[in-house]
Image: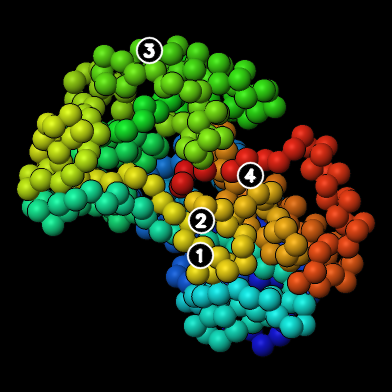
């Protein structure tokens, strides 16, 4: 752990943390001014995902500030190439990422700074950027009878290679991005694949008629929510057709409305719908319990499987780190507005927790610039970590928010 007091400490060396560090070091150029702490390795959340994963946001919108992903990576960047890109970005930091450091708790220090307690000692700083990611803790449903199932159970977080499941009978639980992507990849291996889902998703292709739909979502992000819902549902119908006969009825609410209510975004299709139409995949009901050979569904039917893959989401896992500061909502996510500073807690920021239907990675650069500017503002105003923002900065902050049209709403790689 560094012996000097840095001007900012970033917790986490994923894309959001690296974005914040890259911009902060442009503002604070003295040696050791910006420190990045990481409990495992750079890009760990990506490194731990299955090898066949690729981004469903385009190369041009997925890069870090000032560091474009090489054209050779193609439009849809593969997992390994993205990890290599993040490692090169980390190596460009003036102060190397400190690996193997687990920050256990962030508390307010007596001198107006933040104190970070870790397994490597402690460190104080006037600015803390929490960037441990949306996917710190895999979430698994607690259905009864788990110990009775005789097959294997994987959460997508611990699924290393899709090819390991070739030739198996697989049930994928969840029809979000991870669930439909895993199902698409399994179909190509000749796997007997069934997908269980509770809420019908809005499914869109990565591109339609050669145009990446993320680009359309970005271009129309300023439209009213009702207009965006109507446009997206019309695009889904045009691109995917009516999927009711295949067990996926039209969603009862538009994707942007659902996102605002639950934080769940659209599902990006890479072949799942085609597999449904060709009979190589099927949709089953809602699981309620385990059986010896698979899952029992809500309608009383049993679905048999050799392997069950849980694509049931993640939790942020921030309770131990900052839960005592009153900055988390009922779902354990950082409260709005993001990226901060947290209300009445100047110097505490959250990077990477503001998902968007049009893609999360593209927001990291914007958040990083906001964080860096407010860190500088805070230091130059001589604010203390336990007090409110000085009046002039509070006024400037709320004016900027009012001009943007209100509070941004609060979404898992890719």
Asked if marks 1 and 4 touch (Cβ < 8 Å), the reply is no
Label 2 vs label 4: CA separation?
Answer: 21 Å
Q: Nearer the viewer, mark 1 or mark 3?
A: 1
> Which residue lies at the image location 63% right of the left edge and 44% below the top edge?
363
Q: Residues within 10 Å of mark 3 (few under 14, many from 20)?
A: few
Q: Nearer the viewer, mark 2 or mark 4?
A: 2
Mark 4 lies on residue = 363
Asked if marks 2 and 1 touch (Cβ < 8 Å), the reply is yes
Label 2 vs label 3: CA separation?
Answer: 37 Å
Tell me: residue 139, above or below residue 90: above
- Residue 267 sits in quarter: top left
The image position of residue 105, as x and y in percent, is 55, 74
> Which residue lies at the image location 26% right of the left edge and 14% below the top edge?
245
State the residue in front, 70 or 278: 278
> Which residue lies at the image location 83% right of the left edge and 47% below the top edge?
398
Tell me: residue 304, above or below residue 85: above
Q: Residues within 10 Å of mark 2 (few under 14, many from 20)?
A: some
Label 1 vs label 3: CA separation?
Answer: 42 Å
Q: Is residue 133 left or right of residue 299?
A: right
State the residue in front, 9 or 99: 9
Q: Nearer the viewer, mark 1 or mark 4?
A: 1
Asked if marks 2 and 4 touch (Cβ < 8 Å), the reply is no
Q: How many marks?
A: 4
Mark 2 lies on residue = 332
**Mark nearer the N terminus (2 vs 3):** 3
Report helix, strand or loop for mark 3: loop
> Which residue lies at the image location 54% right of the left edge and 69% below the top edge?
321
Label disc, if present, on residue 241 of the rendered structure:
3
Label disc, if present, on residue 319 of the rendered structure:
1
- Residue 199 sits in quarter: top left
């Amino acid at each position: 752990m560094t012996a000097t007091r840095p001007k900012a400490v970033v917790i986490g060396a994923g894309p959001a943390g690296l974005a914040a560090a890259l911009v902060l070091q442009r503002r604070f150029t003295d040696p050791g001014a910006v420190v990045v702490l990481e409990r495992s390795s750079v890009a760990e959340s990506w490194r731990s995902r299955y090898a066949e994963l690729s981004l469903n946001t385009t190369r041009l919108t997925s890069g870090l500030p000032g560091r474009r992903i090489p054209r050779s990576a193609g439009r849809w960047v593969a997992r390994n190439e993205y990890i290599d890109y993040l490692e090169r970005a980390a190596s460009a930091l003036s102060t190397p990422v400190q690996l193997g450091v687990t920050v256990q708790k962030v508390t307010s220090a007596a001198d107006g700074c933040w104190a970070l307690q870790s397994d490597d000692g402690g460190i104080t700083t006037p600015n803390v950027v929490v960037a441990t990611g949306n996917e710190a803790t895999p979430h698994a449903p607690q259905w009864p009878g788990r110990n009775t199932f005789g097959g294997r159970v994987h959460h997508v977080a611990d699924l290393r290679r899709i090819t390991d499941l070739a030739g198996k009978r697989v049930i994928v639980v969840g029809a979000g991005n991870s669930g439909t992507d895993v199902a698409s990849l399994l179909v190509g291996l000749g796997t007997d694949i069934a997908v269980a889902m509770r809420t019908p998703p809005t499914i869109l292709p990565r591109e339609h008629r050669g145009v990446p739909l993320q680009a359309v979502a970005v271009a129309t992000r300023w439209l009213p929510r009702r207009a965006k819902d109507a446009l997206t549902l019309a695009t889904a119908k045009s691109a995917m057709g009516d999927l009711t006969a295949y067990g996926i009825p039209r969603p009862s609410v538009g994707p942007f409305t659902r996102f605002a209510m639950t934080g769940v975004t659209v599902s990006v299709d890479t072949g799942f719908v085609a597999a449904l139409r060709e009979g190589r995949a099927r949709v089953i009901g809602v699981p309620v319990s385990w059986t010896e050979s698979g899952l029992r569904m809500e309608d009383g039917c049993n679905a048999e499987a050799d392997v069950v893959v849980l694509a049931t989401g993640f939790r942020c896992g921030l309770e131990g780190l900052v839960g005592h500061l009153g900055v988390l909502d009922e779902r354990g996510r950082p409260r709005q507005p993001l990226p901060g500073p947290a209300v009445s807690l100047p110097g505490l920021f959250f990077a990477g927790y503001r998902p968007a239907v049009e893609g999360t990675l593209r927001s990291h650069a914007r958040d990083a610039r906001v964080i860096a500017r407010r860190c500088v503002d805070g230091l130059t105003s001589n604010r203390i970590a336990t007090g409110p923002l000085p009046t002039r900065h509070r006024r400037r902050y709320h004016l900027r928010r009012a001009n943007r049209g209100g509070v941004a709403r609060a979404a898992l790689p890719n």
